[in-house]
Image (cartoon, helix red, strand yellow):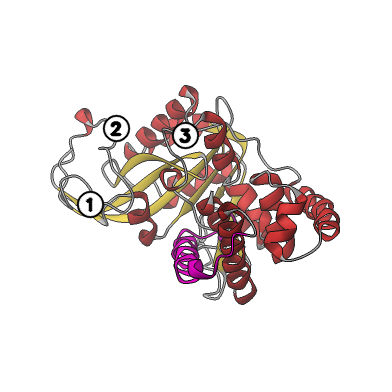
Amino acid sequence: MIRTINRSAAGSVHDAEDLVRETYLRAWRSFGTFEGRSSVRTWLYRIATNACLTALAAGAHRVLPAGLGAASDDPYAEPALAASWIGWVQPLPDALVTDDAADPASVAVSRDSLRLALIHCLQSLTENQRAVLLLRDVLGMSAAEVATILDTSTAAVKSTLPRARARLDRTAAGAEHVVPPTEPAQRALLDEYIAAFERSDAVALERLLHRDAVLEMPPARTWFRGKHTCMAYLAARALGVPGDWVLYPTAANGQPAAVAYRRESPGYYRAFGVAVLTTTPDVIRRIVAFGDPTLVPAFGFPAELSGTVDRGARGAAPEHVPGEPFPGGSGLAR
């Protein structure tokens, strides 16, 4: 759960990993001064929360393109890049925060606390509101425990929580209902999305989208709403021709996702980024395509692929663990 605090608060896989390391480093340095006046669990959560609060006070809030302005109605124009100082909410690999051996309830809590829409909405809260909400509603700690961690009064925690919930509710109004990525129907949708993209099949992809589908593409600030506008952009500027893309299924923020590679020359593909899907039981409501190659290694995949791509024999992605070498190195024949 230390990772859940860090990742939910940070909104960035890179910042969150730094915070995890900072938390354990602080704990190691100060363990000799631990007096046992609270449980080790509370002590660790206090260190993790303080590390997050320090980082949040020094950094800007992270956003998604839809938080920067209205949707574009011109899918044929060049997407506008955002200013370099804008920080983006980033996808977080499920594998880093969920444990297949954990009980289903714990896995559900981890996934629910990492939903992309929730991470985005959390950015609207003050640092203190974010800490109280995560500790109380995500980790289920008592008001007294939270007061101990934040070095404040129980009354202050109790007054902060409803304000944080109300602000989050206002920000999250209209957010999509997310279906877990482990559901067979969601995996089938992801497989169809991958197949359509790899075949550059605009017709098949259009069938998968909700009529009010949203397409966001950080680091571009341009985004689109509506199936026909989204598809016009994808067909004109993204899909290319069959063989331009190779995608692998994964999961991010408790949602179906795909790691994407773009062909640069015959038999050679370079990492493009990660697409996170928000799905209903039968359609895709939102695609957030993070065009950031540095995210790919965080999901346990290499920065490049080389070798023969056998589309007919292509199956699921090879087993991989984030942070460990990808099977077969950078060369991958499929």
Is residue 126 in view? no
Question: In the rendered image, which quarter is residue 248 located in?
Answer: top left
| Amino acid type, residue under disc 2 in the picture | Ala
C-beta proximity under 8 Å, tags 1 and 3: no
Work out whether residue 151 or residue 304 is closer to the camera in this orientation and state it: 151
Q: Residue at 41% x, 34% y: name it.
A: 100
- The secondary structure type at the circle numbered 1 is loop
**Residue 147 sits inside the magenta stretch:** no
Report the residue marked by disc 3: 102
| Amino acid type, residue under disc 1 in the picture | Pro
C-beta proximity under 8 Å, tags 2 and 3: no
- Crowding near pointer 2: few (<14 within 10 Å), some, many (20+)? few
Question: In the rendered image, which quarter is residue 187 located in?
Answer: top left
**Residue 35 sits inside the magenta stretch:** yes
- Which marked residue is nearer to the observer: mark 2 or mark 3? 3
Label 1 to label 3, Cα distance in Å? 24 Å
Q: Position of residue 250 (x, y in %)?
A: 39, 40
Q: Residue at 65% x, 35% y: name it.
A: 177
- Crowding near pointer 1: few (<14 within 10 Å), some, many (20+)? some
In the rendered image, the vertical position of residue 140 relative to residue 208, given as above or below: below
- The secondary structure type at the circle numbered 2 is loop
| Amino acid type, residue under disc 3 in the picture | Ala
Report the residue marked by disc 1: 325
Report the residue marked by disc 2: 316
Instruction: Specify which label sits upstream in the sequence, 1 or 3.
Output: 3
The segment highlighted magenta reads 8-36
C-beta proximity under 8 Å, tags 2 and 1: no
